[in-house]
Amino acid sequence: MPPSPRDLPVWTRAAASLRAGTPVALLLVLRSVGSSPGRQGFKMAVTADTVAGSIGGGIMEHKWVELARQRLRDTDAAPLLRPQVHRREAPADRSGMMCSGEQDVLLWPLRPADLPAVAAIEASLLNLSGGFLALSPTTGLQFAPPADTAVAPEAPTAFAAAEPSPAAGQSAFYDYQPGPAWRYRERLGFRDQLTIVGGGHVSLALSNLAAALDFELTVLDDRPDLPTLENNRAAHQRRVIDYETVAAAVPAGPHRYVVVMTVGYRTDAVVLRHLLGRSYRYLGVMGSVAKVAELRRGLRAEGFSEEEIARLRGPIGLSIQSQTPEEIAISIAAELIQVRREATLK
């Protein structure tokens, strides 16, 4: 089965607990800055004897889990929102950690009445159908489907399902307004999409790694009946296409990562001709220094600008002297992580 978004186990645990009548609380990082171990959107579901997810780990997470369990024992249904400062010298709200960042953590005891919204969120993540989570002290926990999806009769509809602004980075995925009347909104599902053009052995190895890195994953190839494509169970989508139509299969976007690793130089050149110059967070091609230099020379001869060619990464992968498909995949995955963090930590 293809990988699911990182948050699915949290909502699955929450939904199962509510269905069983088991008290459960949601822990959620609403804001994070600096070297915070828990980034915005990190979540946990906590019951008396189980947890799912993470808000950053360490002593801070342990304290919040124990606080959630205490509130569940006391049947205290009041939400608690508290900043956590990861500095020993902080005058207040010290988390017990020393990594120098900050995060706002929400403890939200879930009620039986939250089950329809929680179940809708779980289904949205499981089916990759999209939608939005919203939380506020006045409207409670809500789910809204994507703007172009009809609202189920039992689904909460108290807030609009309009798309967030298309700004790059975290702001396009999360919307948090602090203060006494705070509100939080989050797009559900995968934030980042990885398209691998080429379905060979390195593609298969990279897919298996990317499955653990919270990418929505598509693998494309022009060869029908390719065993490594057929055996790729990590990808959400596997398609055989004509590389002359690859641009239609790889939409541009600030969260789109594209790795080109087709069967050879000629098909790499075809793909890059159609993709270069479009707006991607990452566009890279696998190959030797000599091969990539030749690809760049060919693209230059076809009229692509130096600026466009400079945005093409290659040879891809961090330099770790990798040789096997699995080692090469690790080096590429590390570079994808590096680029992702450059975007989210600015």
Image (tube, grey):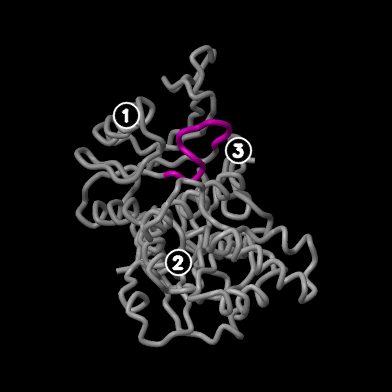
Say which residue appears at 61% left-offset and 47% top-offset.
343
Look at label 1 and name its amino acid: His
Q: Is residue 172 visible?
A: yes
Tell me: 123 left or right of 294: left
Decide: is 124 above or below 61.
Answer: below
Residue 164 vertical placement versus 45 (above, below): below
Tell me: 114 left or right of 316: left
Q: Position of residue 58 (x, y in %)?
A: 36, 28
- Type of amino acid at the residue the image marks with label 3: Pro
Residue pointed to by mark 3: 178
Image location (x, y in percent) of residue 89: 53, 12
Q: Mark 3 packing: few (<14 Cα in 10 Å), some, or many (20+)?
A: few
Would you say residue 36 sits in the magenta stretch? yes
Q: What residue is pinned by disc 2?
A: 217
Mark in the foreground, 2 or 1: 2
Question: Can you tell which quarter of the image residue 24 is in?
Answer: top left
Q: Which residue is mark 1?
A: 62
Chief secondary structure of the magenta span? Answer: loop
Q: Residues within 10 Å of mark 2 (few under 14, many from 20)?
A: many
* Mark 1: few/some/many CA within 10 Å (<14, 14-19, 20+): few
Quadrant into which the C terminus falls: top right
Spatial CA distance of label 3 from label 1 is 25 Å
Q: Position of residue 189 (x, y in %)?
A: 46, 61
| Whole-number angstrom distance, CA of label 2 to CA of label 1 | 33 Å
Residue drawn at the location 61% of the way across and 35% of the way down: 179
Secondary structure of the residue carrying tag 2 is strand
Name which of mark 2 and mark 1 comes first in the sequence: 1
Q: Which residues are magenta?
A: 32-42
Sequence-first tag of 3 and 2: 3
